[in-house]
Amino acid sequence: MGIPQHLSHPKYRADIDGLRAIAILAVLGFHVFPAWMHGGFIGVDIFFVISGFLISTIIFENLEAGHFSYAEFYARRIKRIFPALVLILGASFVLGWVLMPAKYFALAGKHMFSGATFTANFALLRETNYFNSTGETDPFHHLWSLAVEEQFYIVWPLLLGLVWRRRWNFLWITIGIALASFAFDIGNLGSDAAVAFYSPLSRFWELMLGGVLAYLQLHRPSVLSRNSRGMSVLGAALMVAGFVLISPRSNFPGWPALLPTAGTFLLIAAGPQGLINRQLLSRKPMVWVGLISYPLYLWHWPLLVFMRFYTLGDPTVIQGVAVMLVAMGLSWATYRFLEKPVRRRWPGKPVVALLLAFMVVFAIAGKAIDKQQGFEQRSANAGLLRFHYDHLRGFRSGECFIESSGKVAPESVFKPECSGRTDGNERAPLVLLWGDSFAASLYRGLKHESELLGFDLAQYTSNGCPGIMGFEIDKRPGCKEINEFVFDQIKRLRPHTVIFGGNWTLYNRRLNNWTQLDFVKFRATVQALKKEGVSHIVIFGQLPTFKIDQPVVAGKVFLKDRVDRTTRSVNSLDFPVDEQMRQFARDNGVDFVSPMDVLCNAQGCLISTSPGELMPLAFDYGHLTESGSRLLLERALNENRLTLP
């Protein structure tokens, strides 16, 4: 039995393709030139409203006409969404196999699975947030928005079918769901920005806004036709305001998201004869870009990611323009030779089955890549295996470093030897190291110095938990209790020196979705240490971090006795954070050591502990190896940046 082909579709509007062009060009601008187009990511929100409008129009019209078919609806969604996605998954798999080191390819495999199963938003919700630089090395990061739309396509027709059978009011149900979703969005902005950004529950209101417009256009057209010119101009003004006023530091989506979504609502409501719609959005170049907007969205991000791996840095202006032009060419070819034939000429049921089979294959392939840890023996990973560093041993994990990110009882992990006083000799001065995993990576260098200088060394460190009393981190449950335990040890051990270390750049609500660093509580912690008689307090500033792991970068740019520094892939956010920590130390009368000053200069940051042989300072994006830790401590002491007892 064939799939029925009788669903009606709304009349084509060229201006809506023009709106799609605005949305995709904004997204491309943000991804390629974020400093110039800092609000471009709201293009996704424009897409959401457009999708909600078009899909709701199809469902409303066909339910009311009595010939809505779930089978045909989902078959058409598959024929619309899957062909280009299958192509991009396949191309990214091939390029990833050739260009990506194992660590990154394993993560790409994990996200290939979530992309093929339309759960990418849930995968990212558990890991990071949109503005985190981790996404810059993930070719499937952008599929989160496609997942949100597909989840909407699954739920919305079923819900509207129920509403239709019960003879409930479409409009009030749509408005009610939109308001509930918006309330969920607002409620999570302060407590969990990732949920607010990625959860379908906090995004459906944007698609519902399009649904409200679809209902009004079908049943209350007089409400929308009173001032099309004014609606068009106001809609465009709201959209421009969104691009100008919204940035990655905004509490987004939330209230700011009303600018692009309300603007899109008004522009669609104005109709094809609205001023902006007629004079700008319906122009042939805009319509052309709108027609290829879906494959262009899919193509542009993997191309940028693989360019970063090839060049080890963000694209230059010329490279960025080149990526956009290549993406447009590939997108036109995808639209012309794949999407149009599949939708218009290929038989329905067989092609739907074939596309579903392809998606299953890519889901299985992604899971295999993840399970096989990125297939370490590939040529793209050649040379990196010799740089393997056992950081669990280096950090003393399970003894003096809590690796688990779950809630644990600190007294059950920290061993007696963490105190540095196991031999019963308390005559030597005691230095105590306190902080997160970046602090733990300082241990080996401090241990080497303790053997040379004769002081004892205590270590109390924990993953994602800086040494700040009362500091609660939503992504690191139990941090408050861990620091209370450490402070009790300080009162018991009475160290001469306490050294704080941390990945200070990490603790930034908007950029990394980690709890914002609380300098008030940090100041109170410093004062409490002074009150307990700690005579010497040192804060180590931000270690230099890389957007692509330092061994990967070093393996490509290091030249024996010639090049042991680079600016490629260095995270520029670390420099102002280091200065912020320097100022905090100065204001609170404690010593400060800047790893950025020690390890970086105008020529870049060190990538090897030896100019004559490649020995990376860090084993990943920033955590120091033993040789890197020793180099940092030796230089800090020799340059009189640090004093130890």
Image: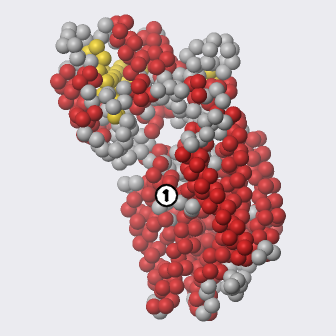
Whether residue 503 is situated above or below residue 90 in the rendered picture: above
The C terminus: image quadrant: top left
Residue 349 in which image quadrant: bottom right
Rendered view: 39 above or below 185: above
Q: Quadrant of the N terminus?
A: bottom right
410 to the left or right of 630: left
Q: Secondary structure at mark 1?
A: helix
Q: Where is mark 1, residue-wise?
A: 122
Q: Position of residue 252 (x, y in %)?
A: 49, 57
* Residue 206, placed above or below residue 89: below
Nearest the camera: 205 or 371? 371
Q: Residue at x 39, y 59 (%)?
A: 188
Kind of residue indicated by mark 1: Phe
Image spot of residue 214 (x, y percent): 59, 81
Give the residue at x 38% y 62%: 187
Horizontal relation, residue 411 to residue 610: left or right: left
Q: At which x and y percent is residue 260?
A: 57, 64
**Quadrant of the rendered structure where residue 438 is?**
top left
Q: How many marks?
A: 1
Residue 426 placement (x, y as % from top left): 19, 12
How many other residues sit within 10 Å of disc 1, few (<14), some (14-19) or many (≥20)? some
| Residue at figure coordinates x 30%, y 44% from the top left | 407
Horizontally, residue 412 falls left or right of residue 315, namely left
Q: Is residue 417 visible?
A: yes
At a point 37% along the width and 6% down the height, the residue shown is 452
Whether residue 522 is visible, yes or no, is: no
In-front residue for pair 597/225: 597
For the rendered model, the colour scheme is secondary structure
